[in-house]
Every structure is written in C-alpha cells, then in structure tokens.
Image (tube, rainbow, N blue to C red):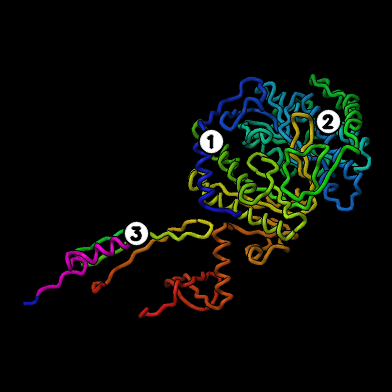
Amino acid sequence: MSWNYQRSYDRIHDHLDHMGEIEVAKLTREADLEQLLSETTCREVNGAHVYVQVSNFARLASDGLYAEDDYKRLIQSVHIYERAVTRIVEGLGGVLVHFQGSKLHALFYRPIDDYEQLGVRAVLLQLVLKDFVKTIFNPAFPDCGDFTIAGGTDLGNAIGTMDGINGDRELLFLGAPANHAAKIISTAHRLRLTQQVYEALPDDLRAMCFQTDDGPYQVLPVSSDDLDALLKSHGLTWNRDVSARHVEEDKERFHLEDIAYSSAEVRIEVDDLSIFNNKRVLGASIFADVSGFTRYIDEATSDEEKQEALKVFHAIRKETARVLTGDFNGVRIQYQGDRIQGLFHLPQDDEEAIVQKVVEAAVGLQSSMEHTLKAWLPEAKDLRLAIGIDMGTTLISKLGARGQRDRICLGEEVECAAQLEERSEGGQIALSKAVYEILPDELRDHFTYSAKVQGYVATDLTAEKVERAARGSKIYRTGAAVFLTAGAIGLTISGLKSARARSVAPGRPYAPDA
Amino acid sequence: MHQMRKPWYLQDGGARLAQDRACIAGAFPGLTYQIDEAAGLVFLDGSITLVAECGVPTPIAVRVVFPVDYP
C-alpha cells in the first residue's frame, strides 16, 4: 500500500461528512473530562499544564547490551514510576492527561478559574516529583541509575477535546499553555514556569523563583522539610511514607518473573500490551507536528472560528493516523496535542526496508497535508507538517495506573526523532544520520544536511514530487532526456541538465509527417 | 469580382468545427472553443489536467490558437 490521492480525498470527505456539529463551551464546573469530552464536545479549560520529564528511561530502553533481567527491571520501574506519579498528581488535585514516553503531562483546573491555586499546585507538583524521585524512586531502583527530572508549567486557556474510539481514546488539549509548558523544559534538575504562572503565584512561592536568561522563571530547590511546610501552608498534602509504601507494594505486585518482552513479526497491537506483555523491536519512530496550529487555535476568538479550528484539527488528526496505519502499515502510538507519534517495525529487523517505509509514510503525510486536507479545508492553508524520524531499539508497551494506562514508546532514538521534529519547520521532513545513510538513493537524493535541524532535511516533499523525480531520473539514465529550462526569455530546450531544468518524456518521437 | 473566402470554421456549414468540438469535449472536457469573429481566429482555452500515478491532479492552463489556414 502507498499514498493515493483519491483514497485520501475520499476518506477525509467521509470523516467530515460524519463529524457532526462541534460544540465549544467554557468549562464552568468540575467534571470527569474523559466522560465529558469527545470529538464534538469540547471545552475551554482554564488550567495549569505541567510537563515533567525524567532522565534515564529512554537511554536504558535502547541499551542493546542490557541483560534480560535488567530490561525487565526497566519495564517494572517505568510502570511503577507512572503509577506512583499518577497517584501524586491526583493527590494534589490534578488530572493525568497522559505520559508521552516517560514525560508526564498533567493538568490542574480545579478550583475553577482560581489562577493562584492552580499555579501553586502546578509548581508544588514539580517540587514533589523532584523529591519523590530523589528520596523514594532512586533508592527503590538502584540498578536504573540516578534519575533526575526537569519540568515546565504554563497557565491559561486551552481547548480540551477527546480523540479516538474505544481503547484509543485520549484526552487532548490545544492552545498555548498546553504547548508552552513542554517547550520551556530545559536541562535536568530545572523546574521552570512561564511568566503567567509566576504572576499568579503568592509571595512565598514567587520568592523561590528567579527569571532565567532565556525568559522563563526557574524554581529554586527546596529541602524535604521545607517542601512539607510549603504543602501544609497551602492546604495540600503529600505523604512521603505512603508513596514509598506504594512503590514497595507495586514491586511485590509486579514481579520480574511475570514480566515478559519479545520482538514482533507482525504489526504490534499496542492495546494488547501491558506490564506483562511488552515488545522490544528495531523500530523507526516518526513524529509529525502541525506547525502553526497553536497560533491558529489561539487566534480563533469567535465560537465559529473555534469550531472551524477544531474541525481542521480533527480532520488532520484522523487523516495522519490513517496514512500511518492504513497506507503504510505503521503503528500509531499516540496523539500529543497537535502532534502524532508513530512507529514502523516491519519487516522485523530489516533496517533498510523499515527506513524506506517510514520515509515513504512521511512523504504520504506531507501529501495528505498539502493536497487533500487543504482541498477540503482551505482554511488550513497556512498549516504545515514538521516531521522527524530516527530508528533504534525501542520498547513498546502500555503501562501505568489501571484505567489510565498509556501507550509507551521508549528509546533514545524515539526522543531523537521528537527533537528532529521540534527543530524542523513546517513542510520539512528531518532524518537522523543513521536513517539518511541507509535510505535508497531515489529517496536520499531529496535530503540535504541542515545544521539548524541537526539532521538531513527535505522540504515540501510529496508523493508527486518523488514520483516525478524518479521518472525524470529514469529518463536521464536512458539518455533520452530533454530539459526545459525556465528563463527570462521563456523556455530553453537543451540536452544539458541544469539546476532549474525539468525533464519531460515525449509520448512519441517528434516527426513532422508522423 | 473577388469573393472573400469564409473562415474555416464556417465552411461546410461549420461541419469541421462541430467535429473538432465533439472530439475535444470527450478527450479534454476542461477546454472550450472561443471564436474571435473580427479576427477570424479560433482558440481552444481552458486547462488540461495531468494526473500523477499517486493520483495528484495538476491542472495546466492551455490556449491553442488555430491558424487561419487550419485544418
């Protein structure tokens, strides 16, 4: 299967036809967001978004020299970490949005519209997680090395929606705070917050923050005793001993001998995975982000504009998933706001075939974005896809607290693919050196090294362009090329190839009397 | 006395133009005939669409000017 214009065009039409009317209203009271939200029932939520990233998991997941028990211990530790963190988030009144790999995304929206309380909880969550990793998690898993965390939080209005069906349902938040909180994460140990959060904080927490050279504020570290005092003074509780006991109980509950992992000869069904059934494969990770979407949705002020923006979002989301899974037999791992994460792992351990497939899928994604989505949704004309790809040993599972298990894809190359995407601009596909070097020539020729992206980049590469270049290359190799060069005096026809020449193949040889 | 010859598209009651119209309508529905009666010229205007193997259609603007001594 490959990308096809008509198939893409028809399924977008079908999706739009059945989407129904989108309702966007302000969230005015507490609700079970997973029950309330849907593709068409969306809510504007004032809240503090928190991202906390933990080191080590990705590196350990890609370690090819890891002994079997060590790898099982890694899976066990990720699972227990996510369960423990979920309890802490909920204990502080927050909502677990999801884990992106080992990166937490949490939301505080209660008390409704109380920005000071929301900011306090978001900042204290970061401090609690730092304390938890240092005093409970690291001692409980000494073989995994010393974990450190880095965090970011932002405050404001984002639109909450829900995607997918059945086991694929995921909470999604669109808008600046859901995006910026992740973007301000810096190096390990640093807990950061935006100006909006800082301004909402009470004096005691403001006094613990300083502004960094690159803009965001940073929270100074606190001792465990000071943290306990802070929590108490703000009417919040986190019991370190209870957390430690839960971790120990979970270690007993999820024994290493019950944890299994294997490679995959057929496409992985992520929803079939669990702590007891994991996959470890050679896989190519792909991240595709809708460049310009946060600005697009933030600029939507009227109800009609918001509805239109959400319609565009859902159409892009669904079409990109179908390109990955339907057209190219990849695995959709997760939606992350306006970004989709996928994985290609077939044919098993065949790195050349996997790389070709994932790059073709990236070209298919760009084709849908530029040709079919914009044909149906001209209002999306300024939106582009930025795509990053890398390949390596990857752990895939579905881990975390019961009822809130997240699709997890861990590996150094997974993170590298995400970073390539983040450094790319709309319309670009960025590859790591490892992926670039094993691409077939006809695809590799489209990519050049970019120092800014720190990878190999192709811009505006669609299926039609790949096809046209392959056809031109074929004609050139047979020695029958004719080149038309566009110039100031019109078209120049010659047998010489130039940078601006385009090859054409005559249907039949020219003969005046033919 | 010299009699001016009819333009080609009026000769034989316009039979040739009708035949060409039918032919073009089937093969290139995006093209339409335009007649400049003052100049005695016929044009074929519109676009033809090239379709790539992946199905992407590319419309190309086209104008064919028929010479006065056509066909």
Q: Quadrant of the N terminus of chain A?
A: bottom right
Task: Tell me what residue is drawn at x 80 percent, y 51 percent.
Answer: A393
Magenta includes B21?
A: yes
Percent position (x, y) of residue B59? 43, 58
Q: Nearer the viewer, mark 2 or mark 3?
A: 3
The chain that hosts pointer 1 is A
Considering only vertical position in the picture, is A38 above or below A438?
above
Q: Which residue position holds label 1?
A: A300
Percent position (x, y) of residue A512? 36, 80
Q: Which residue position holds label 3?
A: B26
Q: Nearer the viewer, residue A391 or A491?
A: A391
Q: Which mark is residue A84?
A: 2
The chain that hosts pointer 3 is B
Residues under numbered marks 2 and 3 in contact, where contact means CB atoms less than 8 Å apart = no
Give the distance between the C-alpha atoms of the residues marked 3 and 1, in whole angstroms. 46 Å
Task: Tell me what residue is drawn at x 57 percent, y 43 percent.
Answer: A316
**Tag 2: amino acid:** Ala
Q: Which secondary structure lies at badge 3? A: helix
Span highlighted in magenta in the image: B3-23
**Tag 1: amino acid:** Ala
**Tag 3: amino acid:** Gly
